[in-house]
Image (tube, rainbow, N blue to C red):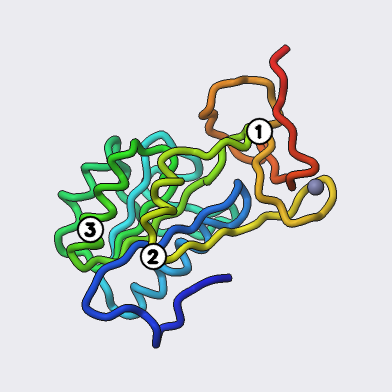
Amino acid sequence: MTDIPPHQLPKDTGWIEVITGCMFSGKTEELIRRLRRAQIAKQKVKIFKPRIDARYSENSIVSHNEQSLPSILIDDIIEVLKHSDDAQVIGIDEAQFFNEGIVHICNSLASKGKRVIVAGLDMDYTGKPFEPMPQLLAIAEYITKQHAICVVCGNPADRTQRKTTESERVIVGAANIYEARCRKCHYIPKEN
Ligand code: ZN
């Protein structure tokens, strides 16, 4: 797992970290781990998630293994700015659900000296890049691509298999609708 050793953390500047991968790859868990460590170091941390993701808990980010941290629910990424003046570390979960404005916002926060940690899906259920994650990956100083385990063959999994035939890009759900698969075992479900 890529993480920045504490002695190598940049000084006197902000930066962007992106944690990405398929569903069930532990992105939120890794985000929570980094934010907790920042809190233990007495840094001021603010955490945001899009309102679309009301799974598990309204006012927390919660990983599939039920770790959680209090978060602010926002409709538009621009709202991060008005809550972040005194924050040293900013966490954003489910970044794929925000519009491309997130790229400018993250850049501007990092340029103000803040550490910005963003977690999100890099591909949709068909295996296509999930904007704005490709743009965030390009501007980030540090990238961690997490893997799950393919439920079919046990290989490392980087794709999200939808188990239903709806073709909307966003259907919020968890293990009832999605599972992790490798390239070999992943397919695009056909509508009936
Ligand atoms: Zn597989």
Chain-order first, disc 2 or disc 3: 3
Chain-order first, disc 1 or disc 2: 2
At which x and y percent is residue 21?
A: 57, 52
The amino acid type of the residue labelled 1 equals Ile
Foreground residue among 88 and 61: 88
At which x and y percent is residue 70?
A: 36, 56
Q: Which label lies toward us, 1 or 3?
A: 3
Foreground residue among 166 and 53: 166
Secondary structure, mark 1, is loop
The amino acid type of the residue labelled 3 equals Leu
CA–CA distance in space, label 2 to label 3: 13 Å
Cβ at disc 1 under 8 Å from ligand 1: no
Q: Are marks 2 and 3 in contact (CB under 8 Å)?
A: no
Residue named by callout 2: 141
At which x and y percent is residue 100?
A: 33, 38
- The quadrant the C terminus occupies is top right
- Residue beneath the point at 29% across and 35% down: 75
Residue named by callout 3: 109
Secondary structure, mark 2, is loop
At which x and y percent is residue 159?
A: 66, 44
- Residue beneath the point at 60% across and 46% down: 23
CA–CA distance in space, label 1 to label 2: 33 Å
- Residue beneath the point at 40% across and 46% down: 135
Using the image, determine if residue 14 lies above or below residue 190.
below
Q: Are marks 1 and 3 in contact (CB under 8 Å)?
A: no
Residue named by callout 1: 177
Secondary structure, mark 3, is helix
- Disc 3: CA contacts within 10 A as few (<14), some (14-19) or many (>=20): many
- Disc 1: CA contacts within 10 A as few (<14), some (14-19) or many (>=20): some
Chain-order first, disc 1 or disc 3: 3
Residue at the right extreme, as displayed: 153
